Amino acid sequence: MDYFPLFIRTTDRAVLFVGGSEDAGHKLALIAKSSARLILFGAVSDSRITAMIEAGTVTHHPRPVTLADTAGAAYAYIAADDHDERDAAIADFSRAGLPYCVVDDRLRSTFITPALIDRDPGVVAIGTEGTAPVLA
C-alpha cells in the first residue's frame, strides 16, 4: 500500500488552495462540507469559486501563497495553471511540512484524495492509489 487512508481533523483549521481554476472549484466544493476555513490564493477563473467568495465561504487573497500563510493549516491543494506559482507553492508547503495535493499530479503530491461516499456523519473513502479513479 503506497497511500495510507487517514481522516484529518479540520475543526479550527484552514485548508489552503492555490489557484482558482475549475479543478480547484471541485475540491473547494468538496472541502466546504467540512468545518475547515477555506483560504484561496491567486487568480480565480471559476464562477463557482467566485460565488463562494461572494457568499463568504472562501477567503480569497489575490496574491501568491507564502510560507507564513501555512501556519495552522491542516493541508493544501494546488490547482494553479501557472507552473511558477505551482512550483513556489510546492516549495513553501514542503518547507512548512504541510501535506499538499497537486490536483491531477499524484507524483508531485504528498497525499491524494480518495473517492468519497458522504452520508454524514458516515463517510467512506475508496482509494485506488490514483491509478483508476473511475473504478473507485
Image (cartoon, rainbow, N blue to C red):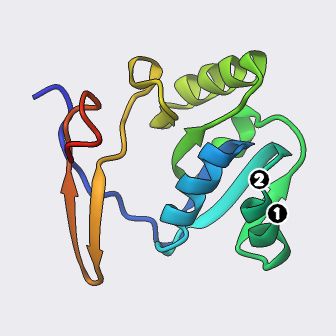
Q: Residues within 10 Å of mark 2 (few under 14, many from 20)?
A: some
**Residues tagged 2 and 1 counted as in contact (Cβ below 8 A):** yes
Q: Quadrant of residue 122?
A: bottom left
Which amino acid type corresponds to the residue marked 1 in the rendered image? Thr
In this figure, which residue is indicated by the disc labeled 1? 50
Can the viewer see residue 71 in this picture?
A: no
- Is the residue 31 above or below the residue 127 in the image? below
In the rendered image, residue 86, in percent from the top left (x then y), is placed at 68, 24
**Which type of secondary structure does the marked residue at label 1 adopt?**
helix
Q: Is residue 76 left or right of residue 44?
A: left
Return the residue found at the far left: 1
Q: Is residue 6 left or right of residue 53?
A: left
**Residue at left 49%, top 36%?**
100
**Which type of secondary structure does the marked residue at label 2 adopt?**
loop
**Residue at left 63%, top 36%?**
79
In the rendered image, residue 9, in percent from the top left (x then y), is placed at 37, 64
For the residues labelled 2 and 1, the Cα–Cα distance comes to 7 Å
How many numbered badges does the structure rendering display? 2
The quadrant of the picture occupied by the N terminus is top left
Q: Residues within 10 Å of mark 1 (few under 14, many from 20)?
A: some
Return the residue found at the far right: 62
Which amino acid type corresponds to the residue marked 2 in the rendered image? Asp
In this figure, which residue is indicated by the disc labeled 2? 46
Q: Quadrant of residue 123?
A: bottom left
